[in-house]
Image (cartoon, helix red, strand yellow):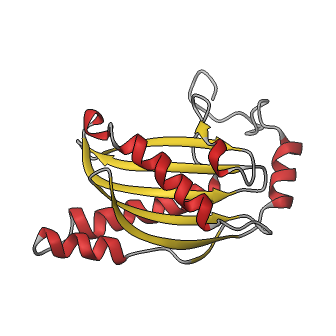
Amino acid sequence: MTDRGELPADPTPTAVDADALTALADGYHSRTVRPLGCATVAGHLLKSYAVQAPGRTVTGEAARAAQQVAAAHLATAPLRGSLGLAVLLVHAGADGDYVLVHTWIEGYMSDLAVFTGPAGDAGGLRPGRSGLAPCVWEAAVLAHERDAFGRHVLDGKGALGDRLAAWREDVLDGEVR
């Protein structure tokens, strides 16, 4: 913007990396998402998903390892204002494995922890670097979960048990882009 608030003649900022963005667009594809169920973990209702890059599969071993990581993280969630509902993403990515633990906390906020590890090494998951956030595919699942939380828990009518059951059953299954 100029001093008067007008857009410059060339709206592309110099920081935009056209080559990198083009390469990302050329490689963009769908990823498979499938629900892994809902369980009580560390006192939380934990809804779990597998996210799979082409040629990769979330194994039972990887899902169990991710749930152990989630249990350790959720054990301290009450200190962060947890409301007891959480979502686990187990992502067999093209470049490694990722585990995201998303928890609804007080004040309409959420808490997110990201763990990373080498592809196929479920025991090698460690906290991701500071600032690491969901990728486009993980964000698609979390967007679905944000909508499900609002639709069933916050806007839902009836007894809390019925609203929680509706939240548990509202899952994403198929392809995300």
Instruction: Residue 83: tell me if it is visible.
Output: yes
Q: Indicate left or right for 11 with 60 as reference.
A: right
Residue 82, position as x, y percentages in the image = 27, 44
Image-based side of 30 in relation to 67, left or right: right
Horizontal relation, residue 170 to residue 118: left or right: left
From the image, which quarter does the C terminus lie in? bottom right
Residue drawn 72% across the image and 56% down it:
93
Marks counted in the figure total 0
Q: Quadrant of residue 50?
A: bottom right
The N terminus appears in which quarter of the rendering?
A: top right
User: Looking at this view, is 89 or 121 the one in front?
Assistant: 121
Residue 111 appears in the picture as rendered: no
Q: Position of residue 106 (x, y in %)?
A: 23, 42
Q: Is residue 88 above or below residue 77?
A: below
Please tell me which residue is depicted at 71% across the width and 50% down the height of the picture: 121
Give the quadrant of residue 164: bottom left
Most distant residue in the top direction? 3
Residue at 78 percent across and 50 percent down: it is: 95
Decide which of 120, 137 is in the foreground and name it: 120
Query: Which image quarter: residue 25?
Result: bottom right
Residue 42, image x, y percentages? 32, 50
Q: Is residue 8 above or below residue 153?
A: above
Q: With respect to residue 124, does 164 lie above or below? A: below
Residue 104, placed above or below residue 128: below
Residue 174 place in picture, x, y as percent: 60, 78
Q: Residue at x 14, y 68 (%)?
A: 160
